[in-house]
Image (spheres, rainbow, N blue to C red):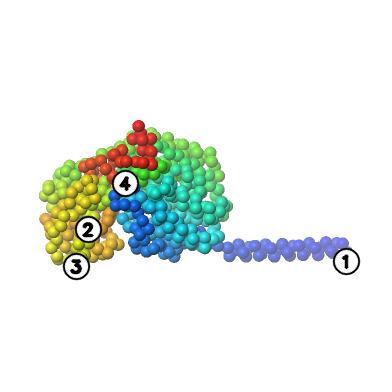
Amino acid sequence: MSMKNMTDKILKTNFFILFLILVTTYSCNQGKKFKFAIIQFSHETCTFCPGGDTTIEDWSKRVPYVSGEELLKSGGYTGGFVHQASLFKDVELIGINSPDRVFGGSSRSWNTKKSFEHFMKIILDDLKSKLPVDAVQLSLHGAMATRDVPRPEAEIAKRVRELVGPEVPISGTFDLHGNEDGKFLKWADAAFVTKRFPHYDAPLQGERSANFLYRSVKNKFKSTTATRKPGILTATVLQWTGAEPASTIMERARRWENRNEDVFVSVFFGFPWSDVPDIGATIHVVTNNNQQLADSIADDMNDYFLRVKKEFAGGSFLVPKQAVKRTKMALQNGKGPVALGDYSDRQGDATWITKELIEQDVEKFLIATLRDENVLKDLSQKGAKKGDEFDYKVGGYTGIQAGVPVRISGEILFFGSHFGYDKIAVVKFGKGNAVIIVPTYEQVIRPSEIRFGELNPDNFDVVVVKSRVHFRRGFDETGYSKTVMVVDALGDFVGTTRLDALDYRYGPINELYPFEK
């Protein structure tokens, strides 16, 4: 064989081998699925609330944990993430066993370290069994407080990072009431925080997280981040994004995102009732391999926060007696129905407004809701039913901040399951009045939630809800109530804007505006 023929044969053989490699690689890539793991561990913790620490049993009231399959059917951040990630044909979603919601929600105090470790073991054991994964979504809150774990969300990210390795992108979604600092982004690659309160955009933040992770695994996004703490602490009632300056702070973040490609600007307003070291407002910026841009945007947002801090941390509200007088005037002037937000009641059993409505002889008012698990227990033991007489002192039992128990004499209109509880009661009394009695703090956001049995919110001139801002979603921003008022309490205790009355042990409140010494 000539040298030329031998060379041609070698070239043809090499070309054929190369062709086979390319075809095989292409075929493998065509079938490759990026595995996106989804984890949820979320709690907004009121460390100053009475009732004792939050235990494993409080997390497991409904189920021991949420299975990975059930998690993929969730709403909120996780629902938005699943919706968006499902559009990518080369992504496989893997739900990881995760803790359920806490019974009592944000009225519950410190999580025990035992409960934290219990659920982290469930999460990490399941995640480990499903390795390797290509990306991880963490659906969190940002205001979790756990005994002996100073920064729970950062700790979650740290343990997940240690398990999946340094190259796997990790992203988190958060509530704007979170307390965070740079520790979370030490272990994770991005954070996406709601920009609206009420939180209409939780699913949207989940979608943004999914897009970020997809671009990251495709090597189209290299995360660079910047974090700033402007040193401001406010009560959540002042954080409504329907008013200044909260609305402009969030709009400024959106403008930075719209002016620049591959920029995500997240703002935490903070949650003052979690006594943690990273308490207060936070700014997170994520850019695509541009540290200088991340720092410049973070600096601008921090400076703007400081320029509007007086307006952001200020605000005063009517006390119950004043609010009820104005309620009567509004009704006389045809400005009803009236919605009253009992903003300071984080336990759910405060009676200040109920007592004032009775004493000022207001008619056709609905208290939605009032917590009294003791009364419900007694009704259950007596086999109570619709139509039975009702004569109890209700509410006002968790301490001075809740007021005093109020006697309600009337008739049971409803006794059964609602709001996810086995037993609640609706009692009608007085001149067209009613009260919904629940076993724990319950925040009513929309009129539709209190339209059940024979109860119809449309039949009342006044509705009182245990809410700071969320109730505006159904009662204010829809036009349902012609008059909306936020009502204060009569003392300096948990829930009010007077945060310096609280005994902070870990949160450096004395270093934060407007409470710095």
Residue type (three-letter) at the residue carrying disc 1: Met
Residue type (three-letter) at the residue carrying disc 3: Gly
Mark pair 2, 1: CA separation? 100 Å
Circle number at residue 508 = none
Mark 2, Cα crowd under 10 Å, few <14 / some 14-19 / many 20+, is: some
Mark 4, Cα crowd under 10 Å, few <14 / some 14-19 / many 20+, is: many
Decide if residue 432 is in sight here: no
- Per the image, the residue denoted by label 2 is 374
State which tag comes first along the sequence, 3 or 1.
1
Q: Nearer the viewer, mark 2 or mark 1?
A: 2
- Per the image, the residue denoted by label 4 is 48
- Per the image, the residue denoted by label 3 is 383
Question: Of 203 and 342, which appears nearest the observer?
Answer: 342
- Per the image, the residue denoted by label 1 is 1
- The residue positioned 57% from the left and 52% from the top of the image is 167
State which tag comes first along the sequence, 4 or 3.
4
Q: Nearer the viewer, mark 1 or mark 4?
A: 4
Mark 3, Cα crowd under 10 Å, few <14 / some 14-19 / many 20+, is: few
Mark pair 4, 2: CA separation? 22 Å
Mark pair 3, 1: CA separation? 103 Å
Residue 40 x/y as whole percent: 43, 57
Question: Of 360 and 440, which appears nearest the observer?
Answer: 440
Q: Is residue 178 above or below residue 369?
A: above
